[in-house]
Image: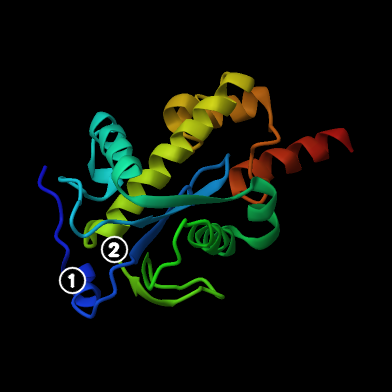
Amino acid sequence: MAGIGTEFEQEYWARGLTRVAGVDEVGRGPLAGPVVAAAVLLDPRDIPEGLNDSKKLTARHRAALGREIRARALWAVGEASVDEIDQLNILQASLLAMRRAVAALPQCPEHLLIDGNQLPADLPCAATAVVGGDGRSVSIAAASIVAKTWRDDVMKKIATQFPGYGWDTNAGYPTRCHKSALRNLGVTPHHRRSFKPVHDILWQDKKLSD
């Protein structure tokens, strides 16, 4: 699969802003696990080939590109926990994870390209929201790949502590297997209690115990 171009980045590179970081998050839809964001500063002279929206890549290609990005670019990851998701709501938790990823970059960016139509508050530099950015900007695509591979690894690790939910393959998304396990095995500390399928089970359990 062909990668996407650098049109968004070129606008800023042409002005002498070489530290243009892409930012994206993954994990808004799952019933379990953190939401994870990544920020990636690509070197304009050394961009891995084939960068694209992480959802359009095979797991093998995504993993290979993730290794390349981490070796050839400056990057950082930020997370918002299940408790923060339940306290803040998933949108605000996603924006929080983005802020944390940007703050953790080893160099301060000069401009940010952020996937979506909303910008986090309190960013360290100017930023542009790019709707569908993970399929339009190489920097955002790189961030989507780093965030996705990072979160998948997190879910595989906690799957070993809570077997039966299929998190090593479904990454916490509401698959048939996951929802069946939720009914049969119950709610874990890694489940998002504010999400309807989890909330409904907790409510049913409460009614049965009353």
User: Residue 173: x, y in percent?
Assistant: 47, 38
Viewed as shown, does residue 76 lie left or right of 85? left
Q: Which residue is labeled 1 in the image?
A: 10
Residue at 33 percent across and 67 percent down: it is 19
55 left or right, relative to 121: left
Task: Give the amino acid at mark 2.
Answer: Gly
Q: Are marks 1 and 2 in contact (CB under 8 Å)?
A: no
- Residue 132 numbered tag: 2
Mark-to-mark CA distance, 1 and 2: 18 Å
Q: Residue at x 28, y 68 (%)?
A: 18
Instruction: Describe the colour scheme in one phrase.
Output: rainbow
Earlier in the chain: of badge 1 and badge 2, it is: 1
The quarter of the displayed image where residue 165 is located: top right
What's the residue type where badge 1 is placed? Gln
Where residue 147 appears, x then y in whole percent? 42, 46
Furthest residue to the right? 210
Identify whether 152 is placed above or below 17: above
Please tell me the numbered disc located at residue 160: none
| Picture residue at 46% right of the left edge, 51% below the top | 76
Q: Locate residue 157: give its quadrant.
A: top right
Near mark 1 (Cα within 10 A), the count class, few <14, some 14-19 or many ≥20, is some
Name the spot of residue 15 as percent of width and height, x first: 23, 80
Assign the N terminus to one quadrant of the image: top left
Could you say which is closer to the camera, residue 142 or residue 161?
142
**Front residue of 46 and 112:** 46
Secondary structure at badge 2 equals: loop
Q: Nearer the viewer, mark 1 or mark 2?
A: 1
